[in-house]
Amino acid sequence: MTTFRLKHIAAALVATGALAVSASAVAQIKIAVVGPTTGSVTQYGDMVKEGVNTAVEQINASGGVLGQQLELVIIDDACEPKQGPVAANRVVNDKIGFVVGGVCSGATIAAAPIYDEEGVVMVTPSATAPALTDGKDYHFIFRTIGRDDQQGPAAAKYIIDKVKPSKVAVLHDKASYGQGIASSVRDELQKANIPVAIFEGINAGDTDYSAVITKLKSNGIDFVYFGGYHPEMGLLMRQAKEQGVTATFMGPEGAGNPDINAIAGDAVEGMLLTLPADFTQNPANEAIVKAFKDKNRNASGAFQLPAYAATLAIAEGIKAVGAADPSKVADYLHTAKIASPIGELSWNKGGDLNTFEFDVFTWHKDGSRTVNK
């Protein structure tokens, strides 16, 4: 009898709108986190999730956004171009208006047209390929990381000014990200009259790179730049060392994964990397770094703080326009200047950051790294 009466009272309250305040109090704003939860580079997805989770925890603890809590929806694209549109369509079908991701350039490039056409704000903290935004006239696509044509020149400048090699090989994994940044480095080196004796793609996922390593030896290569991710970079370095190649290896942020140590072994010692600057060293970020540490997370990885900044940008956009309206948030971001742990965020018409800082690091076999200035 009591249960029956309570059910009917509740139904009547819902019908009359008397429960509207209660429903509003628990309303949530969903943000999709799109990246690899499966595949060979899941660690990069983990880095992004650490950054997003930390930002959301802090935002929600301080009252959320417009009185609503942020809710994360994790969607896997395996960092595969063919899965990018699948993930994007899931976001659209689930009526989610905001995305942090994708993580890898190929999958992100494939997904971006869907997000833009459907009016979903996408902020990637890690996809660096210029092809994501070049010539696209997107309105809803943004980054919180620099492009390869910012990272490539930073790498080339270090090679030219500090390494001064005699003969260089520039290799890549034939993918949008790897080939794009490798091409940028090659072009900058050639402008400086640094000989690039080999410019060649390898097949990602192969287990034997002896053919290209033989070319390195026969051409007297003393410096190798590789555009791609850590599994191939690690294997190249290990097999090169086993075959007596003494060249210095350098790669982009995609190779900056602790798992490369297990793949490359001792050959990893002295590897050079371009990575986002270590923003954890900024005293202004002390409280944010502590929030990461309190959850046993590492704020100093390549993508954690850019992912934090991406989440912050979405939240600040919603606050600024007074609604979780992706179209209005996109309009706002194109004109905004937002303080973040990676510096002031402001975007050009294409959704690329106006400025971003890359540094060159030396990687060590104990897993540590030192910045080179």
Image: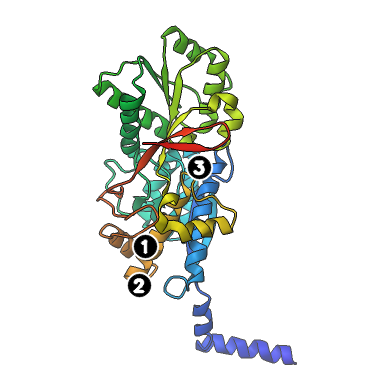
Name the amino acid, label 1. Pro
Question: Does any portion of residue 351 appear in the rendered image?
Answer: yes
Dot 3 or dot 2: first in sequence order is 3
Residue depicted at x 47% and y 22%: 202
The one of 230 and 140 positioned closer to us in this rendering = 230
Name the amino acid, label 3. Gln
Please indicate whether residue 203 sits to the left or right of residue 310 in the image: right
Give the number of the mark in front: 3 or 2. 2
209 relative to 261, above or below: above
Rendering quarter of residue 248: top left
Rendering quarter of residue 147: top left
The span from disc 1 to disc 3 (Cα, nearest Å) is 23 Å
The span from disc 1 to disc 2 (Cα, nearest Å) is 11 Å
Tag 1 near tag 2, CB within 8 Å? no
Q: Position of residue 160 (x, y in %)?
A: 31, 25
Q: Which mark is residue 322?
A: 2
Q: Quadrant of the C terminus?
A: top left
The span from disc 3 to disc 2 (Cα, nearest Å) is 33 Å
Q: Which mark is residue 326?
A: 1
Give the number of the mark in front: 1 or 2. 2
Residue depicted at x 37% and y 71%: 323
The one of 251 and 324 positioned closer to us in this rendering = 251
Category of crowding for the residue at label 2, using alpha-carbon neighbours closer than 10 angstroms: few (below 14), some (14–19), many (at least 20): few
Q: Position of residue 149 (x, y in %)?
A: 31, 36
237 relative to 49, above or below: above
SS at mark 1 in the image: helix
Q: How is the image coloured?
A: rainbow
Q: What residue would you read off at disc 3?
A: 83
SS at mark 2 in the image: loop
Q: Position of residue 126 (x, y in %)?
A: 43, 44
